Image (cartoon, rainbow, N blue to C red):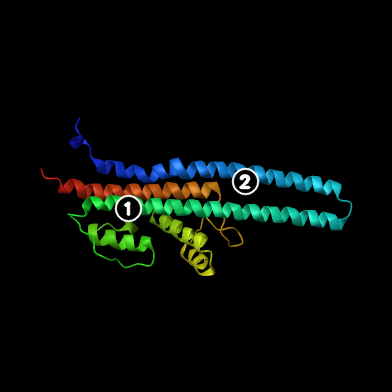
Amino acid sequence: MAWKDFNLFDFEREGFSHTFDEIVLPILDASEQRFNQREQEIDSEYDAALLEESNEAERRDARGWAAYKQTMLDEQREVIGAALLNVLCLAMKDSLESMSRYFKASHPAEDKYPGKSWLDKKQAEFKGRFQIDFQDAKEFSRVRELVLARNASVHQNEGTLNEYREKVSEPRFLSDDGFLTFEKGPLVESFVDSNKFVEWVWCELDRIRIKSIPN
């Protein structure tokens, strides 16, 4: 088999999942293990402190110290979650850009596309260049959530957080009190949905590629 027999476009469908498997998931597993271990340590330290304290004031101090440690742990979890969401968004953006480069001659891109976020701009680009409407992908709403959650976690301001709250009907990354929280389950679900979306885009582009091959 010669190099001409390989379809390099086939490799594009694996890039996003490779990033998750080789970068995101190992970090997520290691951090989740450490967070669970630390939570057990905090509980044990609190129980031990209650046994040692002799009055209500000292027990109140012990509860306050345990709550402070839990808050620090929650903030550490948020930092890890924000970083991983950022990696996923960058990987998805890179996948979309890498796939579209195969069509720079047959479907040239314009200099600029409208949109507030990079996802809005990519949506306009793919609709204009390929007549591919991201809204036709059933996972697109979850992809948009990923980008909005990433923006809220990275920029850390009320505007981006409110945008996430308002635009996502069933947010996966909000706690009961309305603040960002990142657990392993929702992060993995977000990857699965995003990976399906990238796969859908690849299939749509592959149809265009096959039609352009001379008989």
Q: Where on the picture, by quarter, is residue 29?
A: top right
Residue located farthest toward the top when viewing the structure as drawn: 1
**Identity of the residue drawn at 50% across and 63% down:** 155
* Crowd class of label 1 (few under 14; some 14 to 19; many from 20; radius 10 Å): some
**Identity of the residue drawn at 23% across and 57% down:** 130
Left or right: where 107 falls relative to 15? left
Q: Where on the picture, by quarter, is residue 61?
A: bottom right
Three-letter amino acid code of the residue under disc 2: Phe
Label 2 element class? helix
Residue located farthest toward the left when viewing the structure as drawn: 215
Q: Where on the picture, by quarter, is residue 143?
A: bottom left
Quadrant occupied by the N terminus: top left
Please determine whether, in this image, residue 72 is positioned above or below residue 27: below
Res. 126 mark: none
Measuring from the top left, give residue 157's x and y in whole percent. 53, 67
Quadrant occupied by the C terminus: top left
Three-letter amino acid code of the residue under disc 1: Leu
Label 1 element class? helix
**Identity of the residue drawn at 31% across and 54% down:** 97
Q: Is residue 167 visible?
A: yes
Q: Is residue 138 visible?
A: no
Res. 96 mark: 1
Query: Between disc 2 and disc 1, whose residue precedes?
Result: 2
Measuring from the top left, give residue 154's x and y in whole percent. 50, 60
Q: Give the distance between the C-alpha atoms of the residues marked 2 and 1, in whole angstroms.
A: 33 Å
Q: 61 and 144: which one is in front?
A: 61
* Crowd class of label 2 (few under 14; some 14 to 19; many from 20; radius 10 Å): some
**Identity of the residue drawn at 65% across and 42% down:** 37
Measuring from the top left, give residue 173's x and y in whole percent. 53, 56
Measuring from the top left, give residue 20's x and y in whole percent. 44, 44
Q: Which residue is denoted by mark 2 in the rendering? A: 35
